[in-house]
Image (tube, rainbow, N blue to C red):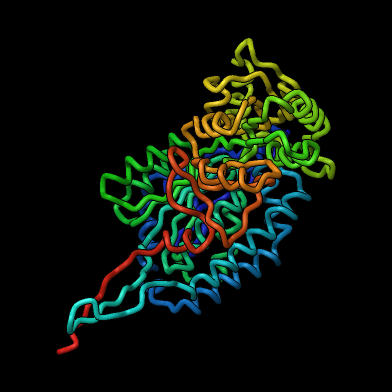
Amino acid sequence: MSTELRRLRNYIGGEFRDAADGRTTEVVNPVTGEAYATAPLSGQADVDAAMAAAAEAFPGWRDTTPAERQKALLKVADAFEERAEELIAAEVENTGKPIGLTRTEEIPPMVDQIRFFAGAARMLEGRSAGEYMEGLTSIVRREPVGVCAQVAPWNYPMMMAVWKFAPAIAAGNTVVLKPSDTTPASTVLLAEILGSVLPRGVFNVICGDRDTGRMMVEHETPAMASITGSVRAGMQVAEAASKDLKRVHLELGGKAPVVVFEDTDIAKAVEDISVAGFFNAGQDCTAATRVLVHESIHDEFVSALAQAAADTKTGLPDDEDVLFGPLNNPHQLKQVEGFIERLPAHARVEAGGKRVGDQGFFYAPTVVSGLKQDDEIIQKEVFGPVITVQTFADEDQAVEYANGVEYALASSVWTKDHSRAMRMSKKLDFGCVWINTHIPLVAEMPHGGFKKSGYGKDLSGYGFEDYTRIKHVMTSLDA
């Protein structure tokens, strides 16, 4: 007996609507592997409509005062709290994440981040006005860039949507946001919440696939394109945006090194690193997935890490003992399985290394040791619950190995030696360096990487400024 699928819809100009040509795609629950909803497969007509709505709303929203934008975003944050259980349910259906962890680890930070950017709207900083040429006064204006085309990923559908719309809207821009085609449910609910607060057209959501995202970036209306996704997707966005010189904001892949020195408290480090590596099934660009451990403590560390993996549980969303749920989709499961299947002969699977169950997309917490710097699993992002372990002999080799990948988003150093920690934080070529911890984020501090991890910052005042442009105004004192 078939079950009728729930129908998700685009949100354009304050109205929910189907794709103009009626096309849809099925949305699959990663816990069961079965479809639970359909979402619009938006085409050019839908992109055109969303961009037109955002463009029409922009002048009015641009001209609101910072205090008005702050008030609106604070109402959005309040609504998030009031409707938290609805948001949790939608996100869990999207992703299969544990309900309890979604409630404690995602809702409070999102609310806090929205409130942070609400305050940031009233705290734009700039140079003071002055006479830099006799008889002429210069001032600097910070203005919104315009319509922003934004593409969010499937690993944190709600939170990454917040990271995009909150600074953009706080700065006076209007938004067309596309969720991943595998996780649209919570973003459509966000549209309902924001739509109850913001003027029509300020926030728009269109569902679709990669072609939909390409149409958004190539569209003539947006002044800025922002994406969180793979390196390949980021390169495609940058190339498409270059055709009309759109501003681009990219948060892409990661391969975070976790450098563990011989003076580290092994038990404490293993406890923290295993959580930071396996949380959200390792589907996090900053996940602690690439451990570099001093050769003198290698065996003890690997043994403890393998035991931590064995003790870590994956399972159903309502199981309170579960740290993480399934991988998001069958393609991602196949990708993780492929990395393990292609391991070189010198690699050793210390724990896990296999699918869990025959329903959904679950994969066991996995630890792989005996690896070399040029191995595929060291150089490429797995994006799954897999932690690799290498050894190093001294500080210089640790830096060489840590920096010897194409990603440069996040890293961590584990040592009791303050001077060494400071040296390493200088030498590590990553946008974030944690010391004796890994993965905490706060709204006040920037998040973003170098190299093929992209450019631009999320969170913080820097992330807010990314959604503004600078204008010089000079006036004669003699007029």
Give above or below for 30 relative to 373: below
Side (left or right) of 309 relative to 134 = right
Side (left or right) of 396 relative to 269 = left
Give above or below for 219 relative to 111: above
Q: In the image, residue 145 lies at what x, y percent?
A: 36, 63
Question: How many dots with numbers?
Answer: 0
| Quarter-of-image position of residue 243 | top left
Is any atom of residue 308 visible in this view?
Answer: yes
| Quarter-of-image position of residue 109 | bottom right
Which of 376 and 153 lies nearest the eye of the viewer? 376
Give above or below for 375 relative to 38: above
Q: In the image, residue 329 lies at what x, y percent?
A: 61, 33
Residue name at image x 65 percent, y 44 percent: 94
Check the image and name the residue furthest to the bottom. Answer: 478
Which of 363 and 375 lies nearest the eye of the viewer? 375
Is any atom of residue 7 visible in this view?
Answer: no
Check the image and name the residue furthest to the top. Answer: 345
Check the image and name the residue furthest to the left. Answer: 479
| Quarter-of-image position of residue 417 | top right
Give above or below for 461 relative to 182: below
Residue name at image x 56 percent, y 51 percent: 160
Q: In the image, residue 375 lies at what x, y percent?
A: 55, 20
Residue name at image x 41 percent, y 53 percent: 149
Which of 100 and 113 lies nearest the eye of the viewer? 113
Q: In the image, residue 140 lies at what x, y percent?
A: 31, 73
Residue name at image x 62 percent, y 67 percent: 77
- Of the 4 image quadrants, the one containing the C terminus is bottom left
- Of the 4 image quadrants, the one containing the N terminus is top right
